[in-house]
Amino acid sequence: MNIKTYKNIYLVGIGGIGMSALANYFYSQNKNVYGYDRVKSTLTENLEKKGVEISYEDNINSIPLVFNSSSKDQLVIYSSAISNNNILSYFSENSYDVCKRSKALGLISEHYYTIAVAGTHGKTTTSIMLSHILKQSNVNCTAFLGGISKNYDTNFLLSDESKYMVVEADEFDRSFLSLNPDIAIITSLDSDHLDIYGSYKEFIDTFQKFASQVKKNGYLILEESIVNKFETPKHVNLFTYSHSSISDFYASSLNFQSDKINFLYNEKGKKYNNNNVELSMPGNHNVSNALAAISACSLLDISNKCISQALNSFEGIKRRFDLHVNSSEKVYIDDYAHHPTEIIETIKTVKKMFVGRHLTVLFQPHLFSRTDDFKHEFAQSLSLADSLILLDIYPAREKPINGVDSKMLLDLCVNNSKKLISKNLVVNNLENQKIDILLTIGAGDIADLVVPIRKMISS
């Protein structure tokens, strides 16, 4: 399948963060782009402004006339989050060329020198930092990102000249196995998506397979603590990085200053100049993400001066430690954290920034299966908050699991102050509550609350 031969592209689930990046790519290639999504969003509105035709009704009558009958110039791409969809069923049952988003991404990557960023945590931050360094260094890249870069206000970067492609390699549904990268970064291997993998062993084995798909004489870059989780393929060059120990690439002289963190980055056995970074995304985990990006850029022979200057100008990512209000009276931070390890790191970073202040965490659990699999770990991480507010579980693609709900999780938490409220009551509830520091976290539609909460706190 040569993805360049298709002229008309239809994306089922076009409003997703990964799907909308694909839609932007095809639009940039002068393809006719159409799509369906369940709800209108900023991402879909931006596509519509470009002329992309989008339907919000799961009805085959909404399919554009150009797709009335199948032909060789038509491609239908669907998100793995889509199920029981009439439009997708119509295309699948009527001999159209249909493929998953991950396969389409893999086919596109065949035309580039591909840098794929994988891991349970840090994929989005690392890939956006990496893309920013490449762009600011005039090496440039085409990038498919899992978040919105604040520097460019987009989840897709395009370069007509650069041979490099940066892609977030998602382990959900084994999607990353569609890639054969030249460079693979694996940031972390905490257990997740056990509804897909069944066991942690299968989870690790699949990452092992991903690592084995790096091209011959390519590079595998691993966070130091996960090196012993699986065997390094013999045909690749292994490099490691760490924010806390001496590795091939490592940090030193870490200095936490208000809402920034300063550090020096180093390469084992080499003396560096111009290697000071002032990072606007605080937290040791973000130093680690920066080191992953630095490692790849160093292997591409980008100068220390370019790397340092790019990271110093990095403005961050929407919904990744997103500081909306910061005053002596009130602070509001929003973050995408939805796994226990991510929640621990985020809360620890907030407490280190704002010592002695009262932290209220508003969390929306994401997926019944994840909540069930890690209920004790979630309870431990959430109990670090001074006050806890839980929303109902965001189901995404899942059906309810008997006995698994937010009350079950709340009962396991040991916060002195804790409660469960409905999403539609959050803003009114917070208005009647004394807020010092508020942290909203979750991967579901809790994002809908960010603007109204910010307005309420700012007023």
Image (tube, grey):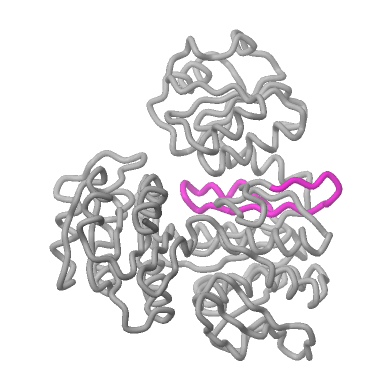
> Is 403 rendered above or below residue 236?
above
Q: What residue lies at 77% left-to-right and 28% top-to-bottom?
A: 30
- Asked if the stretch drawn in magenta spans residue 3, the answer is no
Point out residue 48 in the picture as x, y percentages from the top left corner: 60, 27
Q: What residue lies at 31% left-to-right and 78% top-to-bottom?
A: 357
Q: What residue lies at 50% left-to-right and 80% top-to-bottom?
A: 258
> Is 452 rendered above or below residue 225?
above
The residue closer to the viewer here, 350 or 131, is 350
Q: What residue lies at 44% left-to-right and 63% top-to-bottom?
A: 325
The answer to whether residue 202 shows anywhere in this view is no
Point out residue 129 in the picture as x, y percentages from the top left corner: 65, 63
Point out residue 330 in the picture as x, y percentages from the top left corner: 36, 68
The answer to whether residue 81 shows anywhere in this view is yes
Question: Which quadrant of the figure has residue 253?
Answer: bottom right
Point out residue 382 in the picture as x, y percentages from the top left corner: 27, 68
Query: Which span of residues is magenta-colored?
Result: 157-180
